[in-house]
Amino acid sequence: MQTIDSLGYKVYFDDTLKSLESYIAKKGYSQILIFVDRNTNDHCLPVLQAALPNLLDYDIIEIDPGEENKNIDFCIGVWKTMLDFGADRKALMINLGGGVVTDMGGFAASTFKRGIDFVQIPTTLLSQVDASVGGKTGIDLDNVKNIIGTFTQPQAVFISSAFLDTLDQRQLTSGFAEIIKHGLIQDKDLYNTCKQIDTTKVSTEIVYRSVEIKNKVIVSDPTEQGLRKILNFGHTIGHAVEGYSLLHDSNPLLHGEAIAIGMICEAWLSHKHTGLTESELKDITQTFLSRYDRYAFGTEIYGELIELMKNDKKNEEGKIGFALLKEIGNATYNVFISEDDIKSALDYYLESCIE
Amino acid sequence: MQTIDSLGYKVYFDDTLKSLESYIAKKGYSQILIFVDRNTNDHCLPVLQAALPNLLDYDIIEIDPGEENKNIDFCIGVWKTMLDFGADRKALMINLGGGVVTDMGGFAASTFKRGIDFVQIPTTLLSQVDASVGGKTGIDLDNVKNIIGTFTQPQAVFISSAFLDTLDQRQLTSGFAEIIKHGLIQDKDLYNTCKQIDTTKVSTEIVYRSVEIKNKVIVSDPTEQGLRKILNFGHTIGHAVEGYSLLHDSNPLLHGEAIAIGMICEAWLSHKHTGLTESELKDITQTFLSRYDRYAFGTEIYGELIELMKNDKKNEEGKIGFALLKEIGNATYNVFISEDDIKSALDYYLESCIE
């Protein structure tokens, strides 16, 4: 596999950690900060250390794992730790972890002393296919996802399958939802391939194809003025379900699990509004329901979900905006949908679960 | 006076508020947010309203005035208010106030939903000559000044002398320190002019000349990789004194007052290290001491001041970096100075005060 060229930086797939080593050796950083959560500190940092025996001098910043910690309070803690370590503008931050680490670490780095260099080493399947390209950094505020953030490109991204071995099945399946999404919005072949794949054995080739699709979209529209919005398929409703679950569940949904629900609902909206056929809708519904557990909720939470959707960044002038499918492999964006239709889409999910 | 072209945007001086009106009319913003502090809400917003009778529909975000409030807690309050107002990505934020409002408002806007448009209407002399160009946004953390922020350019800057009439003498004198600084680092004529000016009557011409100098420097080095650092003359020690005063004084020093102290100390360092003559040092010392009250402190606070300096963004690899003068009108940067010399520079200030 080749290196993928993104917005001024490269995504490495082959000999990844060797590439990281030569990257660091080439640049004269004053200091290396490695940002991890407790899980990646335990399971991924040893992999990194084994691969980079010459990387001896670094400081570790650790946060508690979990999406519920991707908030401003933890971010303040990260900034203060950077201050305590005496990080200057020539420090490098290595974000080693899933989306929480890469999103928050990217935000902390992009705003510390008005911006220091950072590289991303996404360690979950989700972050490898989703957070690895695009330059979105962010944290949540008041349970509104990624509401505070920047568009800042990393210096480089290093994707290694070595880290996927550290994941449990639930995390792999969660990440797989974004790969299916990339197929649905841009590549019917990838979608069909996904339907036949056992998510316990995700190959680097599939990760590569998925990143390639996402990269093509974001390079054409770095700051989400237009086409890039199609990447949000499933995310308007999915983010609301995820925000709701973070707030109310002791064992909240993972991102991909919530997005899978969102994609079922938004496939229904696509059938109603943008030409997706009924058989495609059924196919998509079946694809997700066969892989993801049903999430039980009642109509009494619709109001709260819609309030969460109203804070979505894709909205304009108070209308709730969606990216929807015209057909499998072909998406559109800036489709504004009424609250009644959103409720019907949620109804469709609940009905599909009991069928 | 002509409009000044900065990094992709214009700074308006003539018919300023009319220019703002036509700017807003031209763009199709979904919403207007006006960010003020209590003082500018009382004294400057009426000026704006009188000049823009057609601007009827906007939301006001207000913070308490004062540098001590330019921190992350207040910034979170601003973000939450933006959320409450339902601001979307096509909203415009108008920052109407001094440096606290323009710096924090710029930061809040540049990070809300990964960035919305903002324009600056600096209302103090200091912010007109200092914060108006350069694209620096920022807030303080743990009394470290501007440690969190971004480089984000506003859409436009509107400078109007109408707002200077709302200032008291102390604020005008504070802002004047930055004008003197622009003379010291780049323009001996401006410095000599400044020495003859009564700070109660600062003309728009002087503001224009000062902005022109700063703009020339920042356009050549937008992200402070090199030359732009000369703008920090007086600020390494000045920021530490300001941070100390914010922490310990009930009526803390204003920014320009602290920077005036910093420039006296750093002129002494310039005499010792970069060729400033003794007569120039005396001249600079006299210029500031004749305009700014002495600030009483003892050698027992030197340790705390140096700790504050160690967090300065210009430092590299633990060494404290300075911009210093080679002569009046000519500055250099990346001069790293020992703690002993910094203490001697502070001694020089204290001795000058009692002479």
Image (cartoon, coloured by chain):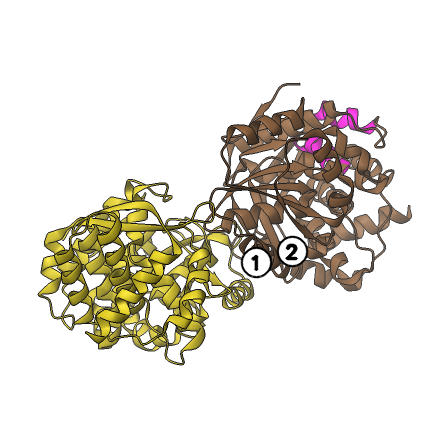
Chain colours: A brown, B yellow
Disc 1 residue type (three-letter): Lys
Determine the CA span between mark 2 and mark 1: 32 Å
**Secondary structure beneath disc 2?**
helix
Position of residue A88 measured from the top left corner of the image (x, y, whole percent): 48, 48
Front one among A193 and B217: B217
How many marks can you see?
Answer: 2
Labels 2, 1: one chain: yes
**Label located before the other in sequence (2 or 1):** 1
Query: Residue at point 52% right, 62% down?
Result: B79
Disc 2 residue type (three-letter): Met
Q: Tag 2, which chain?
A: A
Q: Is residue B220 above or below residue B260?
A: above
Query: Residue at point 40% right, 49% down?
Result: B314
User: Toward which corner of the image does residue B207 lie, by quadrant?
Assistant: bottom left
Magenta segment main secondary structure: helix
User: On residue A80, which mark appears?
Assistant: 1
Q: Is residue B254 above or below residue A244?
A: below
Query: Residue at point 67% right, 30% down?
Result: A52
Residue span colored magenta: A176-195
Position of residue A127 measured from the top left corner of the image (x, y, whole percent): 69, 39
Position of residue B165 measured from the top left corner of the image (x, y, whole percent): 21, 73
Q: Tag 1, which chain?
A: A
Position of residue B71 measured from the top left corner of the image (x, y, whole percent): 48, 66
Front one among B330 and A193: B330
Q: Which residue is mark 2?
A: A309
Q: Is residue A119 above or below residue A63?
A: above
User: Toward which corner of the image does residue B233 lie, by quadrant?
Assistant: bottom left
Neighbours of disc 2 within 10 Å: few (<14), some (14-19), many (20+):
many
**Is-magenta flag for residue A190?**
yes
